[in-house]
Amino acid sequence: MQGLRTLQLALKNKSRAYPDRKDQRYVDERLLPTVKPSFSIDDTSTVFTIGSCFARNVEEVLAEAGVSVPTLGFSAPLEEAPGRSNRILNQYNPGTMKQCVSVVHRQDIDDLGLIERENGWQDLLLATGKLVTRERALERRVQIRNLYVGGLASADVVVITLGLIECWYDKVSDLYLNVMPAPEVLKRDPDRYIFKRMGVDESVDLISKTIEGIFSFGIPKKIILIVSPVPLQTTFSDQDAVTANCFSKAVLRVCAEKICSEYPQVDYFPSYEIVSSMGIHAMTPDNVHVRPGVVQSVIAHMMAHYGAPTMPQHAALGQA
């Protein structure tokens, strides 16, 4: 692009300067970047959520605004999913997200990724280490597959929350895993499982396949892509967890930018930027989970732009 044309476009961008504390984008000790939605969400919308634990936060606040959220209807027994009945739906890396969407087009449910241990079976594709019977593990997979089938078929908007790039990979089954295989499993088959730290190219490929899978359903889909502000709790790299987390989020942020430039139906929403602008003050004392009031303010900012004018504003920024 010619230099003069670049300058003309830049001058039209009213948000081109980084906000100081007098800027209207600075509110209650956080920065609220300008958002330019390409579509809207209202109380007739159905929003399907895919991704890390921040997706669970997003769906709850959306439901409070009157939006239909199919994933909130899923519930696992407390002994399988302590703390939150649908946390078993968490998908942390682009590989497992792609696998969840891919399986909906299959009629059969296989047992790949199910590992027999001393007192039961562990599903390495799920965000839980709890052991169950093999029958229950397969039943649960059917339930989750059915949730994706029905939810994606009915949804007009899908929110994808990208969590991290570190994961374990099963070379035999060609599967990305949601949890690390137990030490005895690694010892039993030392060449089968490897640690992966995905780069931009691999992540973009997997996210693209996830999006293409979502678009294969009948109802035209709009997608909001989010980078989760929840940090990497533990790294399997040789770096400090703080440094490893920064790299992980940087890779995912680049991926989100590349995906949005390729797919006009996909918007990026800057939840990561909003929470990061507050530093550790946005987090609970463990410095990992985002304070509920902050989550509400983030989604309030999203719905202020994506929501219909008649929808209630459910979270005031000053209460965060």
Image: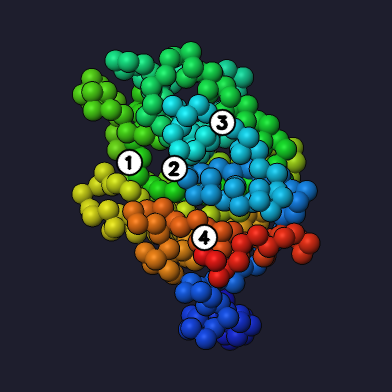
Residue 122 lies in what quarter of the image?
A: top left
Q: Which residue is mark 4?
A: 293
Q: Please name the amino acid that badge 2 sits on.
A: Tyr
Q: Which mark is residue 75?
A: 3
Q: Position of residue 199 (x, y in %)?
A: 38, 50
Q: Which of the two labelled residues, at mark 4 and mark 3, occupies the earlier sequence position?
A: 3
Q: Is residue 31 left or right of residue 233?
A: right
**Badge 1: few (under 14), some or many (20 or more) residues near its Cα, within 10 Å?**
some
Q: Amino acid at mark 4?
A: Gly
Amino acid type assigned to the residue bearing label 1 in the image: Lys
Q: Closer to us: mark 2 or mark 1?
A: 2
Label disc, if present, on residue 196 of the rendered structure = 1
Residues at circles 4 and 3 in contact by the CB criterion of under 8 Å: no
On the picture, is 117 further left or further right than 102? left
On residue 92, the disc is 2
* Observer-nearest of 250 and 283: 283
Task: Find numbered disc 1 in the image and state the secondary structure of the residue it sits on.
Answer: strand
Could you tell me which residue is drawn at 48 percent across and 72 percent down? 30
Query: Do tag 2 and tag 1 residues touch (Cβ < 8 Å)?
Result: no
Secondary structure found at label 4:
helix
Identify the residue at horizontal 72%, vertical 60% (top origin).
312
The answer to whether residue 266 is above or below residue 28 is above
User: Which callout, 4 or 3, points to the residue nearer the camera?
Assistant: 4
| Among numbered discs 1 and 4, the one appearing first in the sequence | 1
* Visual colour scheme: rainbow
The amino acid type, in three-letter code, at marker 3 is: Ser
Choose mark 2 or mark 3, whichever is in front: 3
Q: Residues within 10 Å of mark 3 (few under 14, many from 20)?
A: some
What is the spatial separation of the Cα atoms under label 2 and label 4, in whole angstroms? 23 Å
Foreground mark, 3 or 1, reads: 3
Q: Nearer the viewer, residue 108 or 308?
A: 308
* Quadrant, the N terminus: bottom right
